[in-house]
Every structure is written in C-alpha cells, then in structure tokens.
Amino acid sequence: MNFKMVHENYNVYDLQKSLDFYREALGLTEKRRKEAEDGSFIIVYVGNDTTDFVLELTWMRDMERPYNLGDCEFHLAFQTDDFAAAHKHHEAMGCICYENPNMGIYFISDPDGYWLEIVPAK
C-alpha cells in the first residue's frame, strides 16, 4: 500500500489577502477552485510547477474573526534554491517571524499567522 501527499489545508480569514501573500512570498498561484452553491465557502488550491503538492486555502463566509491557531506548533516547509535571495525578499516583505541561524533556516508568517519554514537546498 502506498500513499502520496496531495495537499495541506489552511483556513483563511481574508482569501484575497492570502492569495496575494502566497503569490508574492512563495510564487504559489491558483491551480483550481471550488465554490459552494450557497456561497458558504470557497476553496482555492495554490501551488507551483515544482511539485504536484498543493496548499488548500479555505474561506468560510460565516467566520467573523481571524482563526485561533493555538500555540502555532505546526508548519509547512519550503525549500529554496537561493536562500539568500529568498531571505532578502521575505525581509523586505516584513514577514520573517523567527530565524535559527545555527540550523540555517527561518520562518515566515502568512496573514493568518500560519508559519512557513524556509530551508536551503541540500
């Protein structure tokens, strides 16, 4: 029996703000979208051409406040072929929330507070 990871879901408060962030910060663009007939939710899958894996961004019409992420002890990791350029870009965006120079990694935070780890290519 084999399994293939296909997507991760993040619920988002402001869908357009999240789509803009993921495009600017990580080059992820919309791959497909599902909208409820009654308008109660929109699901947008974002990704890039380096993998089939996508991030599912779910917007719920009736959510009246930003999501509570608890202690935020989870993250999604992205590998980059130009760590220095990525760091400079994210620094300019003001989205770096934690750095660990000893491990050679850092984290950025999206508009909803989800942490995204940035690691150099091995």
Image: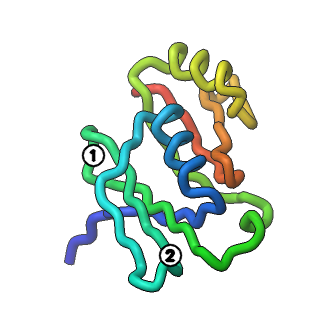
Residue at the bottom extreme of this rendering = 38
Task: Please report the residue visible at 61 percent of the width from the left and 25 percent of the height from the top.
Answer: 90
Task: Please report the residue visible at 39 percent of the width from the left and 51 percent of the height from the top.
Answer: 46
User: In the rendered image, which quarter is residue 60 located in?
Assistant: bottom right
Considering only vertical position in the picture, is 83 above or below 103? Answer: above
Image coordinates for residue 2, horizontal then vertical, percent: 22, 72
Q: Which residue is mark 1?
A: 51
User: In the rendered image, which quarter is residue 80 located in?
Assistant: top left
Q: Is residue 75 left or right of residue 122?
A: right
Decide which of 46, 118 is in the foreground and name it: 46
Task: Please report the residue visible at 67 percent of the width from the left and 48 percent of the height from the top.
Answer: 111
Image coordinates for residue 16, horizontal then vertical, percent: 54, 51
Separation (CA) of disc 2 from disc 1: 26 Å
For marks 2 and 1 on the same chain, the one whose residue lies earlier in the sequence: 2
Mark 2: which secondary structure?
strand
Decide which of 56, 7 is in the foreground and name it: 56
Q: Is residue 69 visible?
A: no
Q: Which mark is residue 110?
A: none
Q: Is residue 49 left or right of residue 86?
A: left
Residue type of the residue flagged with mark 1: Thr
Residue at the front extreme of this rendering = 38
Q: Which residue is mark 2?
A: 41
